[in-house]
Image: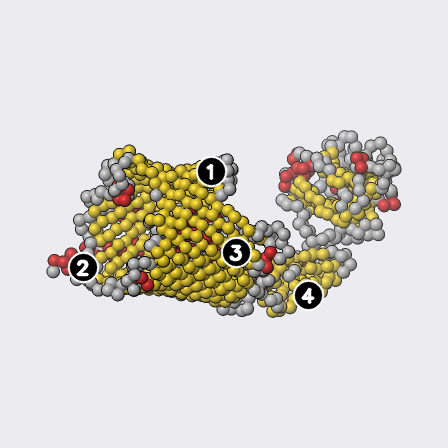
Amino acid sequence: MQKIFHLLVFTAILLAGIVPVRAQDGGSKESEKADDGQRVRFNGLGRAYLLNTEIDGNVLDGDTATTREITDGSFLLDLKINATPNDKTEVQAILRLRNEFGGFFGAGQTVEVRELWARGIIADRLKYRVGDMDLAMTEYTFFLPPEEGSANLAAAFLPQQDVIYYENFYTDENTRRIQGGQLDFGLNFTDVLDEADFSGFFARTRGTDFFTTPSRYVTGGHTKFSTKTLIDTIGLRGDFGFNIVHTFDDLKSGDANSGIRNTVWSADYDFTVFERPRYAIHIQGEAGRSDLISKTDSSTLYESDDWFTDIGIGLDLKQQKLKLLLSYVNIGPDFFSMGAQSRRVDYQAEKTYYDRVGNDAGVRQTSLFDITRDPAVYTFRMSDRLMNYDPRYSNTLPYGRATANRQGLRFTAQYGKNTDVINADLAVHALGEIRGQGTAELKRFILIRPSANLNIHQLLDWKKTLRFTVGYQFEQTTRDGVQVEQVDLTSNLIDLGMEAELFPRFEILAGFKYLNSKGSDYIPQIVQFNIVRDLPSRSTYDDQETLLAAGVKYQFKKGVYLTLQYQAYNFERSGDGLPDYGLNQIFALYTMYF
Amino acid sequence: MKKHAFLPNRLFIFPAFCAAVLFTHCSRDMDSIDGPNLIDRFGPFAVVSELEISRDTVDFGAGETVAFNAQFNKSVDWVVSITGAESGAVKRIEGFSSLVNSENATWIGGTTDLPFFRIERCTVELTVTEEDAFINTGEVEIASTRVYPGLLLTDFEANPGTNIRVRNFQFEFNLAETGRLNSSVIPPAQGEFSLVLTGSDNAQDPFVGLVEVYSLLTGSTYLQLPSLVPQNIFFNCFLYSDGRPNAIAIIQLVIDSNNNGTFEDGTDATYQPADIVAVTWTGWKPYSLTLANFGIPEADMGRILLARVLLINDRVNNPIPPDEIQYGIDFITFTQGQPLTL
């Protein structure tokens, strides 16, 4: 009953205040419009990626099975065919032709459709899109949280990150790749409200196997409202919106007789409560709730619901180029949002290189090196249980801001722009659990992550680029109690980078990553939703990882470059008796966006 | 002034929005913890209070019970084991908790491993599965044994006279070890006596012999069952084997078809379960099934004259010359609604 009422409120708000409609552009991008005017355009990506990787270290003692050196790679061409049969319709397909390094005469070659969609405008009012699409809403409803293991990634690692992101359809807007349909339209208002945007989508995220696994769908939408300036003397105005995401299994598909319903809805807001030319004060945040039901055709197997709130006060010092935000967050222990809590890094995924090492062919733990270079450990799919995480890399917010069972303060500061001599960020999270895991004692989390980019060429007014990047992440988890309850895990992550343009478009790149972690924690075993089934024995860490990269990069033009690098990785651990190992890599990567 | 007058209308949006936000917040389960308790899982074990037994002597026949009390610093898998000094009967009460008390550790006189307890002294042991070194002990005296519910046909304790008859038609019974015998041959499941059937199949058919147990043992010609619905009445007994092979037990119920109050073989109808029981295990086992499993029609439920206990040889595995086969039976009862619960 309560849920129905929530939906009615949401619908009422959605339909409120219909006034003259503001047309929206649903055609091709501006850059594409400025193309040569042909109705069919060919763009795409070409990539040649060759790698040589060696492994060494104590892990190979007595091991005669593991290959010491692997040379591999691939060549691929993603051919983007974009057609605009009329000025209201646009269709696009990306065909992928791929060949493994060393594959000849058909062996190792694949041809596949990587992307397919169509979009357009109906009656100059309604924008639609069907097929593949990338979608993000708010950080608590539908959002792909960033991966861990980085405080400010050095430019040397960016080409590999570009490969990972491209292969997994990641975008800078933290979107998820889904397949379905989307409708958007906008409204202009004459009073109080300035404008409103409405968007709804429907997608299938999983097909049925016709036996035990039902088809899974996700649907939802959002409304975004902007007010006019309501009090001119103080500049009072606001942006706010309502969001809803509903993930459900179709129990009529196949013979499957059990499935889930996960509904998340929220209201987000950014109110400018005081604004002057030199500064502005904002109240911003988001609040909402989630409902989760696991059911069969006739009965409910599991049910939970919870709420969250995120409210902050922001100060925008415009002349100083400084933005400060202090927030209080409270995300309930039973808050469950598949669309926002599904992670990028899948620690259960099989790694491309050296997934198993040693004489007993043990699974190698996913490391900073894998997170930096291996697309196979990443996913964009939604998981119906909280995925595994590694507390050394991320213990405070392993599932992004939507991590459940957290309350406390968050402080962020942003200074400068990318083109300034220096631009910097700072994020501080002082959080604690709301409900204990295995004890009534609560964990406390401290996460401090400062980062800065130094554009020396701007300082010295050089035409060639010289940039240093630095990032640091300190993370500490503690818990009091009797000895068996106590937790104390500290990790330090350092990122250093340098880009030096020796000749026009020819750069020397250097990057360094270092992580140490010491202490212990209990990692919950979760097999369904967010239910902690067990707390296996304490995980103890006393290890450090170093990753050094050095190389060159030649940029033929924007989006077309060749980089040649050497990377050395070392993993040392003590305390648990597991062997150390190292990985050395040489790679050449040619990328061409055209 | 005009702007001020208009403000309330324009600003309605903020309280409305706040109301919508607050609407999402409701109560939350804060009492529980996620996952198993870490102290239970990994904490050191300690005894807060030792084993206490609520009484030294218990009269189960009068409805008395015995409660066991103890407390640990964490939840553990504990076991209270009560062993009869004379009978060797064992009762085990198990649980997972930090507290052992009357709610989870009360003994009403039943048994886990047959035989039944007798009037005897019992030793009590409290152990913890995860802590091999821990044991608390105590004693309790049984003044009278538990009275089990149901209609007892016989427990073979009293001399039955002619109401138990051994039929050695083919002279294949070993009569020295057949009939109502005391514990010198087989330790009984209850009391001092049980019915034992022992013999060798020398003929060409698998039949060895049978024993007739008349309803007159209950004081009536026919069994006075508490219900005449076959599905509601359970036949219960305990069957024994010392592990030797090839013995099959068949239990029949005989109806007085001609209502003359006496058994006339060939005239009175005989009912038996479809499934045979190969008695080849070691020790006593409970055996229960409804009278509907015997196939007795409801109309004949009030005319059960006797039970026949047959010893059959499993000819498929019969060696040459045949080995002696044997089984025992004790405590034949009829219960209503459910099988006999120990």
Mark 4 on the same chain as mark 1: no
Chain where mark 2 sits = A
Which residue lies under the disc numbered 1?
A110
Whether residue A583 appears in this view of the structure is yes
Chain under callout 4: B
Tell me the kind of residue under disc 4.
Ala
Q: CA distance from mark 3 to mark 2?
A: 62 Å
Front disc: 2 or 4: 2
Question: Would you say A269 lies left or right of B245 here?
Answer: left
| Amino acid at the residue labelled 3 | Leu
What is the three-letter code of the residue carrying label 2?
Ile
Disc 3: which residue: A583
| Tags 3 and 1 both on a single chain | yes
Who comes first in sequence, dot 2 or dot 1?
1
Q: How many marks?
A: 4
Decide which of A254, A463 is in the foreground and name it.
A463
Q: Residue at x 79, y 32 (%)?
A: B265
Residue B321 spot, x, y in % from top left? 88, 37
Could you classify mark 1 by the number of other residues whose Cα lies within 10 Å: few (under 14), some (14-19), or many (20 or more)? few
Q: CA distance from mark 4 to mark 1?
A: 64 Å
Q: Kindly state the secondary structure of the residue where label 1 is placed.
A: strand
